[in-house]
Each structure stands twice: as structure tokens, then as C-alpha cells.
Image (cartoon, helix red, strand yellow):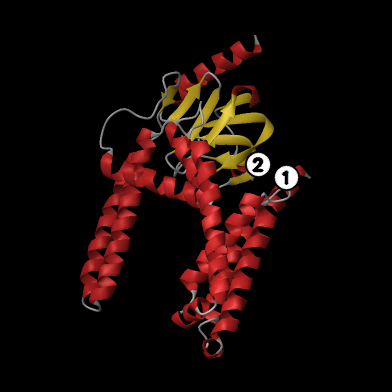
Amino acid sequence: MAAQTSDGVDRRHIAAGIAPVVIVALAGMAIRTPLATAHPFAALLLFLWVVADTLMLSLIARSAGKPAWSAVLGVLAGASVTVWLGSPLAMRDALFETPILALTMAAVVLGHVAWATARARRAAGRVGFKRMERWVSAASEIFPPALVRLAVAEMKVIHMALFRWGGPADVPANARAFAYHKHLTPICATLLILSAIEIAVYHLLVGHWSRTATLVMFVLSDVGFVYLVGLIKSFRFRPVLLTPKGVRVRAGFLIEQFLPLDAIVAIEGSFTGKEVRDPATLNAALLAWPNIMLRLDRPLHRRSFLKKRGPFVRIAFRLDDPGPFIRLLTWRLGQRSS
């Protein structure tokens, strides 16, 4: 029953995130029809109502309880900015011809910026948090939190791809690292070679058809290649960690899941395919069969860059040398029991 409830909440959050984008996009297409062009002020009011109502309903659906006033003001400010940026020229002229409406929208945006800036300053000055965490928290007061987390994730991938070419892995002082990237090296090398060939083919073949299409495809291919390099390098720089408090299972930038020691009840080196494919199992092994499975005494939620996902009671992953990990974790669990 709990799993069903969690899945229902997860689906509700997904719908609340996707539906507004679709509705606002359709409304943006509708205001560019001949009928809307003939009546720009009416189309402007209708567009503003649709965007504000859609974003507010999305906020209510994503909120566990009553939304905070700061969130409501942020939604209204976001609706005002969306209408301004998404309106055609005729509707913008109609907006300027109605000073009361234009000033109201501007006041809402400025009020949100002022209130959010005050909260951001408090968040940036918090004690006991890392510098990056403080800046992310501060930026999330002004911009949508999901957008901030996505931007941070993008910057991490780009930084990893372009600027980190050596040095030790990201391992805290009190943690023990266990690598999993060696078995991925041949596959990763093959992917890089195929990606380079794909870029060359796009450039040569599409160039005979359209110069613009060539530039667009070349840029997209280059961006994809940079992301692929960053992802592959993250496998080495982000190993699985065993800390005094638990296990941090990582798979590059794709997966990072913390398991408290008091939640682990069993360590297994052999298991069935049915268990690995079970929805209650988080399979963190990449392009290979896992060689370690940890069983938990309670369900934990999957975590990604943007949000929580469904619960799991087992986690499977693969290490290049699982023996030392199993021995050290077994000792840690024994110390916990004693």
C-alpha cells in the first residue's frame, strides 16, 4: 500500500511538472492565430490567465500542504515573465497601452525579486553548510529549485569534461573508495570512437545538403560529445564510498545513493536475475552484471538530480574488486551489532 501511495505521488509530481509546459506551449501557439492577432488585448488577458492558472495548479499539486506565500508570489512573477517573453509584438503593444496591467505585472516581479533576494542572503550566510550548498540554496530562493539543480548538474558535467584530466578521485578524508570504472573502460572507449565518427559523418554528409543544418548538427554533436566525455570521466572520479555512517553507491553522475549502516541487513555476492530486475531493486551496475547486492531493513527512495523516485529495499552494483569492500563492510556491520 505504501509503495502504491509513493508511486501515485511520484506520478502526480511528474504530471505537475510536464503538464504546465505542454499547456503553456499550446497557449503560446493559440495567441499567434489570426483571431488572437485581431484581438490582441483579449488574447493577452486570456494568455495571462491560462499561464497563471496553470502554474498555480501545478504548485498546488506539487505541494504537500498549503503553498507558502513566497511560492505563490514566485508563481505569479513567473507567469508575468512568461507572458512578457512569450507574447508576440502586437500583444506587447497592447500591454504597454494598459499601464495599470503593465505596472501590476512589474510590481509582482519586483516584489518577488526583493523578497527572494532577502531570503537568498540569509541562505548564503548559513553556518554549517558547504559553500556550494549555500549558493544553491540561495539561488533556489530566486529561481525554480529544479532549474537550479539542473544548472548545477550541467556545470558539474562540463567542468568534469573540460577541466579535470588527472588527480585523485573525489574521496572525503574519512571514506574508503572502491573503483568500478575499469570494467567500463573498453565500452567507454568504443562509445567515444563511435561518437567521433558520428560527428565526422554528420559534418561531411549533411554539409552537402544545408550549411545551416550542418552547423546545428555539428554544435549538437559537439555538446553531446562533451557530455559523454564528462560522464565517462565521472566513473573514475566518483567511486563507491564506504564511510563510518554508511555506503554511498555512485555510478558517475547518473546515480548517487546513500545507505545508512543501520539500514543494511545483508551483503550478498550471488543472487538471481529476478531479484536484480525486481522494481524494488535499485540496479546501479552499468553495462554489466552486478556482483554485490545489499539488502535493507526498510525502503529508501531513489534520488536523482531533480527529485526523489520510487522506493527500493535492495541495491545491486558492480565493483572491480568486490572482496575488500565486502570484508570491510562486514566488519563495520559487526562493529555496529556489538
- Mark 2 residue crowding within 10 angstroms, few (<14) / some (14–19) / many (20+): many
- Mark 1 residue crowding within 10 angstroms, few (<14) / some (14–19) / many (20+): few
Q: Which sits in the foreground, 145 or 22?
A: 145
Q: Which residue is mark 2?
A: 311
Report the Cα–Cα distance between label 1 and label 2.
Answer: 7 Å
Relative to 198, say whether 212 is above or below: below
Q: Which residue is mark 1?
A: 3
Which image quadrant for residue 194?
A: bottom left
Q: In the image, what residue type sits under mark 1? A: Ala
Residue 183 appears in the picture as rendered: no
Relative to 195, say whether 253 is above or below: above
For the residues bearing labels 1 and 2, Cβ distance under 8 angstroms? yes
x then y, percent, for residue 70 = 62, 50
Q: Secondary structure at mark 1?
A: helix
Quadrant containing the N terminus in the rendered view: top right
In the image, taking residue 125 as reference, residue 154 lies left or right, namely left
Most distant residue in the top direction: 338
Quadrant containing the C terminus in the rendered view: top right
Q: Secondary structure at mark 2?
A: strand
Q: Which sits in the foreground, 127 or 330?
A: 127
Q: Which sits in the foreground, 150 or 209?
A: 150
Which image quadrant for residue 35?
A: bottom right
Q: In the image, what residue type sits under mark 2? A: Pro
**Residue at x-position 62% and y-position 77%:** 46
Most distant residue in the front direction: 99
